[in-house]
Amino acid sequence: MVRDGTTGGTPAGKGGKPRGVGAIVSSAHLAAGASPALSELEFGLILASHAFSRWMVRCMAAAGVPGLSAIEVLILHSVRHRDRAKTLADLCLVLDIQDTHVATYAIRKLAAAGLVATGRAGKEKLIRITDAGRAACDRYAEIRERLLVRATTSTGPAEEVLSQIGAQLRALSGSYEQAARAATTL
């Protein structure tokens, strides 16, 4: 949907003249405010988020581990990160998971599949990658290189631009977090 409430094209405006397409957004009523560009970004985030989730699930299935959810794939890769054991709190902090039950369930499922192992260091529960989990992550990385990285480096933005976009998205996430806290007090 675009800013003027249509789904595209150039409907007639005043005097029968075609109107411009405007910003491409999912909710015209939100784009009517002071920042239509933010609404465009939000629509892009919605589409990118869903596409990224589908990609992770399908790439992991192609790597030989079907049946994992996007959050389970994220947790698996985070556990593999730097090949150091992680605590549940570390994983939830890094991935910004507020409901620890979601992460706990994912870890149990990954452990049942033999991709991670859990243990204790004092009172802390530690999660570490197994050889099977490491192999799955390596296959995922190979498929990602072949199908996604090659495609984005040949037709997409340069590495520096991707890095800048990533930094901007991380900064923007802070604004959304602050706004969410403020909204809770209303």
Image (cartoon, grey):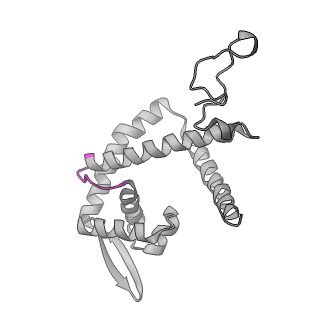
Q: Nearer the viewer, residue 109 or 15?
A: 15
- Looking at the rendered image, the quarter that the N terminus falls into is top right
Q: Position of residue 156 (x, y in %)?
A: 50, 33
* Residue depicted at 39% across the width and 73% down the height: 85
Quadrant for residue 116, please give it: bottom left
Q: Residue furthest bottom?
A: 122
Residue 122 is one of the magenta-drawn residues: no
Q: Position of residue 30 (x, y in %)?
A: 67, 41
Q: Position of residue 143 (x, y in %)?
A: 31, 44
Q: Position of residue 12 (x, y in %)?
A: 67, 14
* Residue depicted at 64% across the width and 55% down the height: 176
Indicate whether 73 appears above or below 154. Answer: below
Indicate whether 52 appears above or below 36. Answer: below
Query: Which residue range is magenta in the image?
Result: 62-69
- Looking at the rendered image, the quarter that the C terminus falls into is bottom right
* Residue depicted at 54% across the width and 35% down the height: 157
